[in-house]
Amino acid sequence: MSFSDILSLLRISLHAMVPLALTAVGEIVGETAGLFNIGLEGILLLSAFGGALAAEFGGPGVGLLVGMGVGGVVSLVFAIINTYWKGTQMVTGIGINLFAMGFVAFGLIQLGAPGFHDVPRAVELVKWRTPMGLMSPMIVVALVLPFVIHWFLKRTRAGLMLKAAGEMPEAADVAGININRIRILAAVFGGLLAGLGGAYMSVAWLGVVTKQLSAGRGFISLACVVFSGLNPLLALLGAFIFGFFQALAEWVKSLPSKPIPGEFVSMLPYIITLLVVSGAIGRVRFPKALGVPYKRE
Amino acid sequence: MSQNETTVQSRLLRGAHRTLTGLHPALESILAAIVGLLVGAILMSIYGFDPWKAYMGLVKGAFGGSYEIASSLARATPLILTALTFSICLRSGMFNIGAEGQMYMGGIASVLVTYFVLPTGLHQIAGLILAGLAGAAWGIVPAILKVTRGVSEVISTIMFNWIARWLALYLAIYVVVDPLRPEKTLSIPMTARFPVLVRGTDLSYAIFVSIAFAFVIYFLLWHTAIGYEVRAAGLNPTAARYGGIRNRRTMFLSFILGGVAAGLAGATIVMGLPPTYAIYGGGGLPQLLNMGFDGMAVAMVGRNHPIGILVAAVFFGGLNAGGRVMQFYGANPVPLEMVRVVMGAIVLVMSIPELIRLFPMVKKQAEGLIGWLRRATRRTEREESA
């Protein structure tokens, strides 16, 4: 393994980290307020698809924005069902995932080639030339955002209000916080970030939309959230670890000698996720009212 | 009015009242299905299809004749079992999303019957046992992780789905592969196949495995002490714990039962689906793909009750079978994927409790009717006693 190999491995890890980090940080905001969204997988898929279409229409910036919009709208639906309508969050999330799987496959067929859709090079987000090779500017966003969110959750009034809505909605309600509204805002913010992550995958990184583009990344980000115990900085670290193992799997697969069958290499990120989550848990504490709809007495 | 007549009348009224309130969950499922189909129709018209024609094609393809009904039931066979996986665990208070992976392992394990010779009957049972064991083995690991390390079963079962997918692909391509036709696994020998039930269709006797298992689960959960414990732990784990119910035991039991169900689903697909009775590794396991996820939709619409699941599975089996017809129907070829869009929308709507609240008009009418029935029952009863 030469120095250039290590550099390219690091570069791919950083690129693979971006969607995981964005999605995980967004989910941390949502979970702090008490909404547990397992529909992230579907949001990533839908926004990757929507973002790619919009990018072909109006360039990469529009693509990323529309991806965020798609994520925000889906999360809004999720949030309304689970606040005002007192829904079951897991079931809503499963519904979003099923819907996304069907809708993206359906949309891809309507575009002509069943199964996948190439995003033209011309509308992909430009990558920066750095000593490490071509780097997407989104990496900077993914590296900075967790710090901003960490500051927001720990140091601002709004961040503490979110925490109150997740820990003890009764008390927060008495203190004059509108629980349902703040939960909806938090979930929509999380959806915007997940949407950005999804659009990044198609518009700025892989340059393709397939029906399995998300490949469990939504769930891996949930694992990052569990691993971090709702700390955005730890979630960033987790996202980097998972990104690294995805990159490693790709690298091993590209070796000409094929030391391990490709199927086993593809399992690696999921096995690592399991190992990390089962190692990390125990010390992690989640908001008391996570997943419970708030009913005023 | 004679005494006898009022008794009959009051009995009838009370019966209607009870049936109506008892049907409430079923009505909600139907409402959700209607909303889901509407969402599908809106999307179809956005994409320039004629939803009415498409649904006509779908219904014809699903229930238009004996061939169509048989093929709907064939699609329902594995769905019943994967839906049971989800709902057994939900009854005990856990979200087991792992039916997909457990089903892959069951499917691969049932291919192993090709390696030994047994008389018909025993051979099928051997295949079912192998598949059930493989599914249970795959399902028990998330339970162990949850008990010992506190890992959320949602995340671990999803990860196990992906691991199972790649493992099953590896096994199908390199280990149990047909040496003459490397795109598929070895075919199940004649003695281990489930015979076809309706000539010329792909409905086999495997459907009785699904139905029997659904009734076994119904009996186990509602008519035995251990089943009561499972349901109690699901309703309120703390109260169940104080009541002397060992939550760990119920957790393991429900994951094992769920794994067995999903494993059997894999077996019914491999051993009971003509013409090749094999898994295609080359195409990425097409027969097995997504049956576990669709099962969750079935479980939800079936209200997590084995009998409800049987009905819901026929509905979704019909959607799948009819969807195949819909995509070749006239000048209006709607892709099969639309079916999954409809399923997703249905599940999304099903997550709203007391769905009827959102339709004030319907609710008002229904409440009015039930109130009228209640008053009428009381009035006749009073007349009776007077």
Image (spheres, coloured by chain):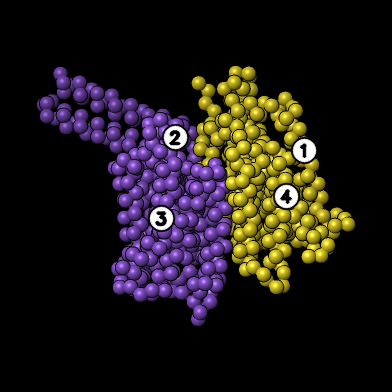
How far apart are the two marked residues, 3 and 4, measured between alpha carbons?
37 Å
**Nearest the eye: A174 or A263:** A263
User: What residue is pinned by disc 3?
Assistant: B260
SS under mark 3: helix
Which residue is at a point 60% across and 55% down the rendered structure image? Answer: A271
Residue type at mark 1 is: Phe
Residue type at mark 2 is: Pro
In the rendered image, residue B237, in percent from the top left (x then y), is placed at: 44, 34
Q: Residues within 10 Å of mark 4 (few under 14, many from 20)?
A: many
Residue type at mark 3 is: Val
How far apart are the two marked residues, 4 and 1, measured between alpha carbons?
15 Å
How far apart are the two marked residues, 4 and 2, measured between alpha carbons?
37 Å
In which quadrant will I find the N terminus of chain B? top left
Proximity of marks 2 and 3: CB atoms separated by less than 8 Å: no
**Nearest the eye: A158 or A256:** A256
How far apart are the two marked residues, 3 and 1, measured between alpha carbons?
46 Å
SS under mark 1: helix
- Lower position in the chain sequence, tag 2 or tag 3: 2
Image height check: is B151 above or below A122?
above
User: What residue is pinned by disc 2?
Assistant: B237
Proximity of marks 3 and 4: CB atoms separated by less than 8 Å: no
Chain under disc 1: A
Image height check: is B235 above or below B309?
above
How far apart are the two marked residues, 2 and 1, measured between alpha carbons?
38 Å
Picture mark count:
4
Which residue is at a point 76% across and 32% down the rendered structure image? Answer: A151
Image height check: is B105 above or below A257?
above
User: What residue is pinned by disc 4?
Assistant: A240
Colour applied to chain A: yellow
Colour applied to chain B: purple
